[in-house]
Amino acid sequence: MALTKLNAPDLGNSPSTSEIITRHLRDAIVAGHFAEDEPIRQDDIARQFNVSKIPVREALKRLEAEGLVMFQRNRGAMVTRVSDAELAQMFEVRMLLEDKVLRLAIPNMTEDTFARAERICQEFIGEDDVGRWAELNWELHACLYEPAQRPFLVGLIRSINDKLERYLRMQMSLSAGKERADHEHREILAACRAGDVDLAVKLLDEHIAGVCKTLFEHLPHHH
């Protein structure tokens, strides 16, 4: 029988076991299912996924490289605790990178960009699931940054966003955070549509600084 008749799936594109475990663990950490400093027991994870500990360890190593997990002697892997200073720096770096990429993006924005951004805003305000808010929040930022044609830069912003996401979910569920975020997103979008780069960047800075401030006011150990 010719091999072409096997209808074999393309395994070159299928995710490995450790990639699947990485994705599930990342989602769980980002969603706040693990507390800061909480140990992640490799045996338990291996049992849940019905695999050996090897792909679990590979997954945890990947998450360590992303800064979501750290390994401690005699305690194994645990969810990274982010200090106040680190949290503040992450917001500072976000602002620098996002300002830069938005400046580059605005001249290249099209009607399609604005239509997509508007659709995301509409879905965001009608959504009740906090996890989905966080996804839509990122989708909107990514939609506005895509025209800059700087995938590496947007990738850096994404990795910082992933580290912040568990805090952002908390912030959005507090103090009318969702309505405020929607209002600020629409203001930024209007400035982009008007081609007013300086105003758009100023509004983006205020948006990021406001999120940071609300977060510090409400986080239990971040006073």
Image: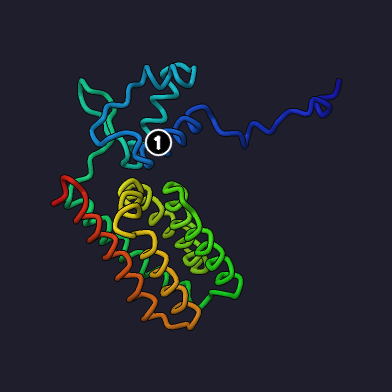
Q: Nearer the viewer, residue 179 or 12?
A: 179
Mark count: 1
- Residue 104 lies, in percent from the top left, at 44, 73
Q: Nearer the viewer, residue 61 or 174?
A: 174
> Coloured how?
rainbow
> In the rendered image of this protein, does residue 193 appear above or below residue 80?
below
Q: Nearer the viewer, residue 159 or 151?
A: 159
Choose top left, top right, bottom left or bottom right for residue 31.
top left
Q: How crowded is mark 1: few (under 14 residues within 10 Å), some or many (20 or more)?
A: few
- Residue 178 lies, in percent from the top left, at 38, 59
Q: Is residue 46 left or right of residue 77?
A: right
Residue under the point 36% across and 65% down? 180
Choose top left, top right, bottom left or bottom right for residue 55.
top left
Element carrying mark 1 = helix
Which quadrant is home to the N terminus?
top right
Residue under the point 26% across and 30% down? 38
Residue under the point 59% across and 70% down? 115
Q: In this view, does 137 lie to the left or right of 12?
A: left
Q: Which of 205 and 125 is in front in this view?
A: 125
Q: Name the residue under label 1.
A: 28
Q: Which residue is situated farthest in the left direction here? A: 223
Please name the amino acid that badge 1 sits on: Ala
Choose top left, top right, bottom left or bottom right for residue 179.
bottom left
- Residue 164 lies, in percent from the top left, at 32, 50
- Residue 67 lies, in percent from the top left, at 31, 41
> In the rendered image of this protein, does residue 47 appear above or below residue 64?
above
Residue under the point 23% across and 40% down? 81
